[in-house]
Amino acid sequence: MKAGIVVFPGTNRERDMAHALKLVSGRTPRMIWHRDTSLDDLDLVVLPGGFSFGDYLRSGAMGAHSPVMAEVRRFAQKGGHVLGVCNGFQILTEAHLLPGALLRNAGLRFLSQDCHLHVDNAKSPYTQGWQQGDIFRAPLAHGDGNYTASPETLKRLEGEGRVAFRYCGEDGRIADDDRRTNPNGSTRSIAGILSENGRVCGLMPHPENLTDPEIGATDGVPLFKSLVEALVG
């Protein structure tokens, strides 16, 4: 699997993502500076976490207008796979590659903690390594992770099976108004979504940070194995 990781000014999770991708796929991903518009021969483009352009205006707003994003949009339109994690998810919504928006956390505080995720759709290229209903742990670190969308968009996302992950308790309990299970207050506890064709995925937590046995947990490995199986076969 040939992967590329886009690096914006302020990105700080590109090495974590590169480590996870190499660990699972065996190939070192290519780092792509945000002014580079060449995505030749890639199977996957990743927009990693961080604070692109210092999160000025809105989180992800300036990153969405970087030169590389026009090519990322074309890449997605041609059938390429795009993964956005944390700030990458924010950029994907600002670029209208995914619907909805990420607002300030419900408590107006930056959160850095573990959370648990419920797998809502186990049939996408990003989730097929799990069973529907599986629960896994992932770190989160963000101040603007409160997912929201119009009622019509939410109805469409849920009706089309495009909610990939929801925040939940360790026991799988989903409770939108309980900050123990839905720490940032996301609408309907949504933590990650898919595009209409399932090839673009955005999520706020960081599965790439739990992929190495050396740090004691591999909960995030199924996402990367799913991509290898989907894109390499």
Image (cartoon, rainbow, N blue to C red):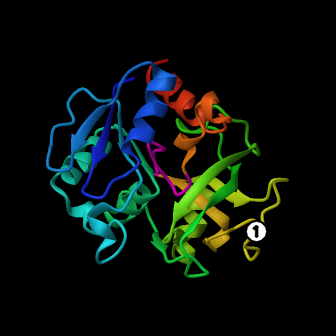
Residue 85 in sight in this render: yes
Residue 203: say if magenta. yes
* Percent of width and height locating residue 214: 61, 29
Residue reaching furthest to the front: 214
Residue at x 41%, y 59% (from the top left corner): 87
Give 212 or 24, whichever is nearer the viewer: 212
Instruction: Indicate whether 172 appears above or below 29.
Output: below
Lateral position of residue 151 relative to residue 170, left or right: left
Q: Quadrant of residue 43?
A: top left
Which residue is at the front of the view, 10 or 79? Answer: 10
Residue 68 sits inside the magenta stretch: no
Depicted 16 relative to depicted 202: above or below: above
Exactly how many numbered labels are in the figure? 1
Categorize mark 1 by other alpha carbons within 10 Å: few (<14), some (14-19), many (20+).
Answer: some
Residue 220, picture quadrant: top right
Three-letter amino acid code at the position of disc 1: Arg
Residue closer to the observer: 108 or 93 = 108
User: What is the magenta range?
Assistant: 195-205
**Residue 160 shows in this picture:** no
Secondary structure of the residue carrying tag 1 is: loop
Instruction: Work out which residue is located at the far right of the displayed protein and give it.
Output: 171
Q: Position of residue 104 (x, y in %)?
A: 50, 78
**The N terminus - image quarter:** top left
54 left or right, relative to 201: left
Residue 114, compared with residue 109, is above or below; it is above
Q: Residue at x 47, y 70 (%)?
A: 102
Q: Characterize the magenta stretch by its predominant secondary structure.
A: loop
The residue that mark 1 highlights is 180
- Which residue is located at x 49 percent, y 17 percent? 233
- The residue at 75%/65% (across/down) is 181
Q: Is residue 196 left or right of residue 192?
A: left
Residue 215 rendering spot, x and y as whole percentages: 62, 35
